[in-house]
Amino acid sequence: MSLLRVLISALLLCWITATQAGELRGTGDLGIIVERASGSVVIVDTTVHRIVSRIEGLGDLSHASAVFSRDQRYGYVFGRDGGLTKIDLLLGRIVKRTMQAGNSIGGAISDDGTLVAVSNYKPGGIKVFDAQTLEQVADIPTPYGTGNERSKTVGLVDAPGRRFLFTLYDAGEIWMADFSATGAPVVSKIGRTGRLPYDALITGDGRHYIAGLFGEDGLAHIDLWADEPKIRTILPDYGKGQKKLPVYKMPHLEGWAEAAGRFILPAVGLHQLLAVDALTFEPIGTVKVHSQPIFAVARPDGRHVWVNFAHPDNDTIQVVDVQCLKIIHEFKPGPAALHMEFTPRGHQVWLSVRDADEVQIYDTRTFAMLGTLKVKKPSGIFFTSRATRIGL
């Protein structure tokens, strides 16, 4: 009877666990869509195009982003109000939430999945947390000027070797925090970027870090494979002689393409994409586009770049062929087309259309719409496949 009771208890525990999880499944085809107006996210199944669950109580998500644990079960959502929230994608619930600052602008997870770093506007600086417990392990202040002010930090990315890179918007510098050894991190001030660095990217091999500049022409580049990484200015003359247009929203450098030996980047204050040689970082061309580009996101194979635009022209999407640097498709999904996310191999793209309260799904070869999901004021879309990629 004792053995029978043990077997019954084990079966009951398995049934309860399966019931809580909803179904026995993997996480590789899951994703998070931010509902920016309601402080909630929906978890979606990208294979069958359905909403799995909704999680509420995540605070101000007006500029939210997310990263994922290595096993792709947990998401870490960075809210604009300084909230860092760990969510369980299988159980559809909050695991833990901490208010770590007054105003935040995104974050990153270390290559080994043990550390989550958050980039802060107020009070500035970087805070780093244990990914399992969300207990704080480091607070990196960013003093500048003659007072006790901290610089806003932006462009936070993970780099190989438990390192994080970030730019100081007010101070115009790039720093690196190295957590590869035990104890306190080693913080290095790599150098000055130029005026008002606003966002940055790191290439998929972890070698190149590029920061955009709002206060002057050009971009700041670092080769992280160098024995002593240094900052150099690239594209210092792009748009020279052209009148800069009003910037209604900063371009985002997280969306970029590398194909046919070139990078494609959005230009600040111009209705252009910039084509840059991937070896020399010299300009090799531009693409005139519909309006001020925000995201220029590469299909995973790098052949096409999908571009969306700032208000008031944000109802349009254009698709650029990287090889010939020409627009090959344009369509209007609706008002406030904010964010695009490709499935891991790029056969589909999911597109948030905020003011239509829906997410649209397209075939990336034929450009045919495959379906829609009703989502409340959707903005950022983040698929769990990001867990396997540097800088996302």
Image: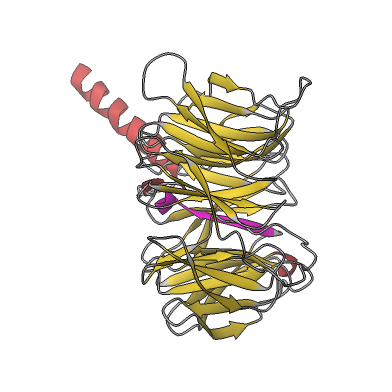
Q: Quadrant of the N terminus?
A: top left
232 over 177 or under it: above or below:
below
Give the total number of marks visible in the rendering: 0
Q: Position of residue 114 (x, y in %)?
A: 41, 29
Q: Main secondary structure of the magenta part?
A: strand
79 over 290 or under it: above or below:
above
What are the residue bounds of the magenta stretch?
Answer: 378-386
> Quick one: 388 or 181, which is closer to the camera?
181
Q: Position of residue 171 (x, y in %)?
A: 68, 35
Q: Position of residue 315 (x, y in %)?
A: 71, 75
Horizontally, residue 74 falls left or right of residue 25, namely right
> Residue at point 44% right, 69% down?
299
> Quick one: 315 or 301, which is closer to the camera?
301
Q: Which corner quadrant of the image does residue 126 belong to? A: top right
Q: Which corner quadrant of the image does residue 70 belong to? A: top left
Residue that lies at the very extreme toward the top in this rendered image: 183
